Image (cartoon, helix red, strand yellow):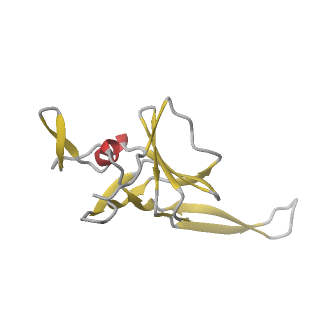
């Protein structure tokens, strides 16, 4: 599935829904089917039946602009805030293992529907920063499965991305 500008990324973790506008995104998954032919005494007509045999992990790629305060987004990327005097001055990259079981589910919403990527784990982040440019990030990763869902689930709290800005 390919999502274009104007689509929304929703990340739900711990009863909080984080909503971001995206520039583009894609979710891809390979599916292998198997089939067999069968006939019975009661139905002597040969029938071919096909079924999904194997699904690969979901490949995730998302391009988005950064807003003014993206604390959760940076934590999802595995970055740890560095504070000096109670003010976040930067982020560090932990060298230990990150618990995959705590990875959030993501929902990509467009006019065509809502797709869920379960247990989204990021593998790479590429930042675009500079004078007179809109700060943005491209993230790639994998999820355990992809499915079409009726809507984005409600959460106790919702946080919407602040507007993107020039830095």
Q: Answer above or below: position of 83 versus 59.
A: above
- Judging depth in this view, the residue of 143 and 134 nearest the camera is 134
Spot occupied by residue 33 in the image (x, y as percentages of width and height): 60, 67
Q: Is residue 48 left or right of residue 13?
A: right
Q: Answer above or below: position of 19 versus 129.
A: above
- Quadrant where the C terminus sits is bottom left
Residue at image coords 62%, 45%: 151
- Quadrant where the N terminus sits is bottom right
Residue at image coords 47%, 62%: 56
Q: Is residue 126 left or right of residue 49?
A: left
- Judging depth in this view, the residue of 91 and 51 nearest the camera is 91
Spot occupied by residue 10 in the image (x, y as percentages of width and height): 48, 47
Count of picture labels = 0
Q: Is residue 136 left or right of residue 60?
A: left
Kindly indicate the quadrant of the structure image that contains residue 83. top left
Residue at image coords 45%, 52%: 144
Spot occupied by residue 7 in the image (x, y as percentages of width and height): 54, 57
- Judging depth in this view, the residue of 130 and 77 nearest the camera is 130
Kindly indicate the quadrant of the structure image that contains residue 136. bottom left
Spot occupied by residue 57 in the image (x, y as percentages of width and height): 45, 59
Q: Answer above or below: position of 67 versus 166.
A: above
The extreme top residue here reads: 156
């Amino acid at each position: 599935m390919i999502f274009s500008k104007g689509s929304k990324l929703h990340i739900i973790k711990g009863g909080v829904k984080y909503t971001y506008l995206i520039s583009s995104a894609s979710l891809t998954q390979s599916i292998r089917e198997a089939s067999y032919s069968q006939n019975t005494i009661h139905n002597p007509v040969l029938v071919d039946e096909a079924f999904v045999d194997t699904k690969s992990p979901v490949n995730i790629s998302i391009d988005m602009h950064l807003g003014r305060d993206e604390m959760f987004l940076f934590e999802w990327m595995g970055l740890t805030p560095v504070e000096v005097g109670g003010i976040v001055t930067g982020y560090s990259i932990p060298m230990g293992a990150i618990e995959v079981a705590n990875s959030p589910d993501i929902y990509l919403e467009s006019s065509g529907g809502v797709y869920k990527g379960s247990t989204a784990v990021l593998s790479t982040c590429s930042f675009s920063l500079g004078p007179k440019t809109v700060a943005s990030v491209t993230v790639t990763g994998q999820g355990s499965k992809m499915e079409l869902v009726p809507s984005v689930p409600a959460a106790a709290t919702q946080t919407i991305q602040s507007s993107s800005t020039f830095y």
